[in-house]
Image: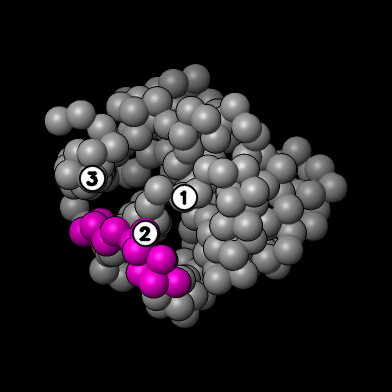
């Protein structure tokens, strides 16, 4: 949605890893066991992969990094990289959400096997059951969206979040938004933040 509204280039580590796993590439084979168990991929590997994807052209247009950085080590790696390119981070946006909401969202999520489009059985159902609106591909449940793995992922993320929030708060880059509610509500809050900061016109 931010890509459509603001032309920012999205880059999601989770999405990238899932693509590499389904392509059975060397990187996919290295990260697969972490992703399927809901564990974090080691920092050095994540930073290397992400920084190789952050090309100068993409940085000029502006990017939204989704799911990255997840640890202090990754945040430091990203900062070092961006400082060298004189494009320091504008903001770290934390979407604060209750565990109950996260469990409902992840538990009902379906993704298109072909194009990666995301749906939700109740919040954002496809027009035809089990089929992607965009490309007609089959919708599947992500392996790490199964109940036991969801619990593990939330536990891991909650443990990492606090130190990361402190890191960006100290750098005066942290913005917290209420992440509960519909995707439209969350987008409205994000656009409000961007306008208040003067990053986009009202
Ligand atoms: P996500 O789609 O963001 O929920 O990520 C799915 C899975 O990919 C996570 O549970 C991790 O196994 C892995 N992953 C994604 N982003 C990162 C990251 N920044 N650091 C380490 N592992 C990650």
- Count residues near mark 2 (Cα–Cα under 10 Å), then give few for <14, some for 14-19, many for 20+: some
Q: Which residue is at 31% across, 70% downward?
A: 99
Q: Which residue is at 34% across, 44% downward?
A: 120
Q: For residue 123, which quarter of the picture?
A: top left
- Which residues make up the magenta segment? 167-179
- Mark 1 in CB contact with mark 3 (< 8 angstroms): no
Q: Which residue is at 48% across, 28% downward?
A: 61
Which mark, residue 197?
A: 3
Q: Quadrant of the C terminus?
A: top left
- Mark 2 in CB contact with mark 1 (< 8 angstroms): yes
Q: Above or below — where is 28 with respect to 41?
A: above
Q: Is residue 111 toward the left or the right of residue 198 in the image?
A: right
SS label for mark 3:
loop
Q: Nearer the viewer, residue 63 or 13?
A: 63
| Of pointers 2 and 3, the one earlier in the residue sequence | 2
Q: Which residue is at 49% across, 54% downward?
A: 67
Residue placed farthest to the right in the image? 26
Q: Is residue 71 toward the left or the right of residue 118 in the image?
A: right
Rendered location of residue 122, percent (x, y): 26, 45
Q: Is residue 67 toward the left or the right of residue 197 in the image?
A: right
- Mark 2 in CB contact with mark 3 (< 8 angstroms): no
Q: Quadrant of the N terminus?
A: top left
The residue singled out by tag 1 in the image is 89
Rendered location of residue 75, percent (x, y): 55, 63
- Count residues near mark 3 (Cα–Cα under 10 Å), then give few for <14, some for 14-19, many for 20+: few
The residue singled out by tag 2 in the image is 173
Q: Above or below — where is 22 with respect to 69?
A: above
Question: Gap in Å between the C-alphas at discs 1 and 3?
Answer: 14 Å
Residue 137 in view in this figure: yes
């Amino acid at each position: 949605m931010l890509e459509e509204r603001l032309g920012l280039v999205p880059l999601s580590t989770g999405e990238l890893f899932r693509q590499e796993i389904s392509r059975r590439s060397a990187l996919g084979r290295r990260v697969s066991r972490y992703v399927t168990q809901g564990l974090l991929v080691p920092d050095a590997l994540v930073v290397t992969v992400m920084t190789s994807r952050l090309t100068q052209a993409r940085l000029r247009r502006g990017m939204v990094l989704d799911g990255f950085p997840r640890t202090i080590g990754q945040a430091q790696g990203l900062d070092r990289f961006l400082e060298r390119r004189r494009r320091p981070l504008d903001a770290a946006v934390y979407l604060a959400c209750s565990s109950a909401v996260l469990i409902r969202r992840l538990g009902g999520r379906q993704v298109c096997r072909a194009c990666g489009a995301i749906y939700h059985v109740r919040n954002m159902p496809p027009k035809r059951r089990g089929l992607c609106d965009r490309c007609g591909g089959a919708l599947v449940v992500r392996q790490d969206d199964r109940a036991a793995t969801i619990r593990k992922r939330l536990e891991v993320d909650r443990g990492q979040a606090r130190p990361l929030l402190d890191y960006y708060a100290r750098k005066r880059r942290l913005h917290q938004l209420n992440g509960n509610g519909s995707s439209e509500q969350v987008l409205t809050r994000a656009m409000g933040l961007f306008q208040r900061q003067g990053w986009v016109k009202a």
